[in-house]
Amino acid sequence: MKRLFVSDLDGTLLNSKAEISDVTADIINREIEKGLNFTISTARTPTTALKIVKKLNLKLPVMMMNGVLVYDMQQKKYIQKTDMDENVVMVLLGLIKTKGLNCFLYGLEDNDFVAYYDSVDSVSLNYFRNERIMKYDKKFVEVEDLSLVAGKGIVYCMLREPKEKLEGLYCELSVVKGVRTEFYQDIYSDEYYMLEIYSDRASKKEALSYLRKAGHFDSVTSFGDNLNDMALKNASDYFYAVSNAHPDIQNMADAVIPSNDENGVAHFIEQMVRQTEEVK
């Protein structure tokens, strides 16, 4: 049986410092060299995700931005990208401005990932931008008005604010055709929530189904911690939650494994591989 293992990053494979520990890297890399089919599925953008996973010798394509992008680690290029319709982006921007909110729009320019913004009045987004520039050298481009880039292959829209500031917009987006949303607490902050908006033709489930078919995998086992991993679970045969996961995710998992700070995913995979070898 050809099996695929897929892990979310933040809160799952990454520890509470948002890093892949040496223990996890050593275990995963050793198992990959022995033939383990392993990849990641994350809400992160390529700029941050690809730098974070450098410690891993990944051979399979990785899924980013909740399935919007699939990146081939061997060919160093995107093999699947789901753009948002320009008219839909304009509708989103109108709703966001009406609520007095700010956002980042993400797109690809000649295979380079870019985050566009027209204001950093938001304390949260300003901090987010500065942190990404300092830690990951992420490319942010200021424009006079975000509507000017609505037709530039936008794949993602992101807002980060206190929950009460985003709830109204989140509810209104439920009736907007052509979009899918993820609304959940930022695991690195008790103060802020993430609202992520992208095409309704993309999801972690769709991206994983694409990889499953392309790789002819008979079984998929995945790992997650937050509400945006529900789509990942729905595309997998087996789903495990780390012990630090959101209660709802723990309740729907096949089992709960040790936390991200205990290298739970890596140790669990190592144990499963060992048990398979013993059966053989």
Image (cartoon, helix red, strand yellow):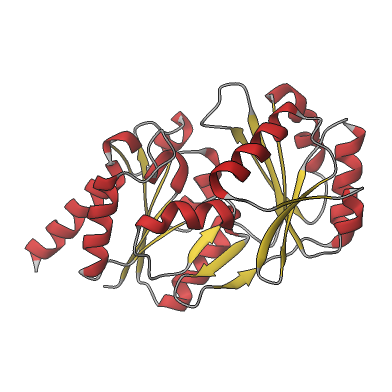
Identified at 15% across, 62% down, the residue is 276
Q: State the residue in front, 58 or 5.
A: 58
Please state the total of marks drawn on the protein image.
Answer: 0
Q: Could you tell me residue 17's position as x and y percent?
A: 42, 34
Identified at 91% across, 52% down, the residue is 147
Quarter of image, res 37: bottom left
Identified at 64% across, 30% down, the residue is 193
User: Would you say 149 lies left or right of 258 here?
Assistant: right
Q: State the residue in front, 262 or 141.
A: 141
Quadrant where the N terminus lies?
bottom left
Identified at 37% across, 72% down, the residue is 217
User: Would you say 18 lies left or right of 168 here?
Assistant: left
Q: Could you tell me residue 215's position as x and y percent?
A: 42, 76
Quadrant where the C terminus lies?
bottom left
Q: State the residue in front, 252 or 28.
A: 28
Q: Could you tell me residue 156's position as x and y percent?
A: 71, 53
User: Would you say 45 lies left or right of 108 here?
Assistant: left
Q: Is residue 88 above or below residue 131?
A: below
Asked whether residue 237 appears in the rendered view, the answer is no
Q: Is residue 226 above or below residue 177?
A: above
User: Would you say 149 lies left or right of 71 here?
Assistant: right
